[in-house]
Amino acid sequence: MTIETCFPLAIYYEDLSDAPQHQQSLIDAVLELEQAGAERRNYPEMAWTGDLHGVEQIHTNPQFAWIVAQVERHTAIYLLELGVDLTKVDLYIQRAWPIVSRTEQEIGAHCHNTAHISAVYYIKVPAEGTYDPGRLVFFNDARVNEVSPGLGSENTDIVDADNYLNQLYSAHIPVEGRLIMFPAKQRHAVTMNETEELRLSLSFDIVLTATATAAGEYEFLTPPPSQWQKFRL
């Protein structure tokens, strides 16, 4: 008997070798931005996220130049592995922001519908121990093996053995210096930071557009912004 699994979700990650030498400067920059940011706009149990507090353009800040260069390089590698012809696309960091997670703070389930690729970089992660520092969770909304809708719901015990064919999510433990990339449309969340330490990370949203010379591709990719015309209202 053979069961073949198809359509995998491609989660890319790389542990950046020179991360330690940039860690402290990134920690200082993130905490400075948090302190200077606008009044808190989300619940205390939610992590502080720059995108909700007017801090979502860190890719233009020289303090983050090193990690921006890493994101650009590894995005290209990721897309090449997915079979994308990079000569036919232009890549843009649409927005980027810091995240500060303190004790008992989490990030609820969401997806980034205005982008194509999302990336997370872990600057500081609580030391390994008994408590969970907060995991990045990807939800299996497609549930292609759920032969009857709702069969695997947490409200039933009909499916009584969890395995790789019926998993509802996958969870990734944060690692300092690790860069993770995934399709922006994939619904995800971050579990509660159960430690007494900070978890600091950066998020990036990346957009693909067609190049100006990629004639015939505009049906499938947004035309380059240089060809857009803003309403003169």
Image (tube, rainbow, N blue to C red):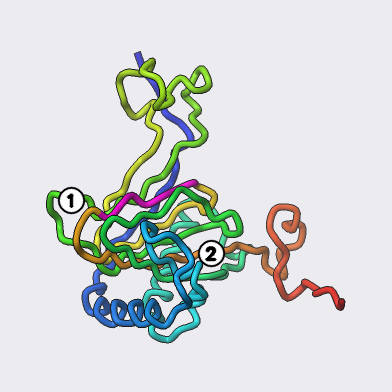
Locate residue 180: give its quadrant.
bottom left
Q: Disc 1 residue type?
A: Tyr
Disc 1 residue crowd, few under 14, some 14–19, many 20+, Cα 10 Å = few
Q: Is residue 72 visible?
A: no
- Residue occupying the point 24% across, 63% down: 125
| Residue beneath disc 2 | 206
Amino acid type at circle 2 is Ile
Left or right: residue 2 versus residue 216 is left
**Vertical placement of residue 31 versus 82, above or below:** below
Q: Which residues are magenta?
A: 187-193
Q: CA distance from mark 2 to mark 1?
A: 32 Å
Residue 132 shown in magenta: no
**Quadrant the C terminus occupies:** bottom right
Q: Position of residue 91 (x, y in %)?
A: 57, 68
Which residue is at 50% across, 51% downward?
Answer: 183
Residue 31 location (% of width, % of height): 33, 78
Badge 2 crowding class, 10 Å Cα cut-off, few under 14, some 14 to 19, many 20 or more, is many
Looking at the image, the residue that sits furthest to the left is: 129
Q: Which mark is residue 22?
A: none
Instruction: Identify the mark nearer the N-term, 2 or 1.
Output: 1
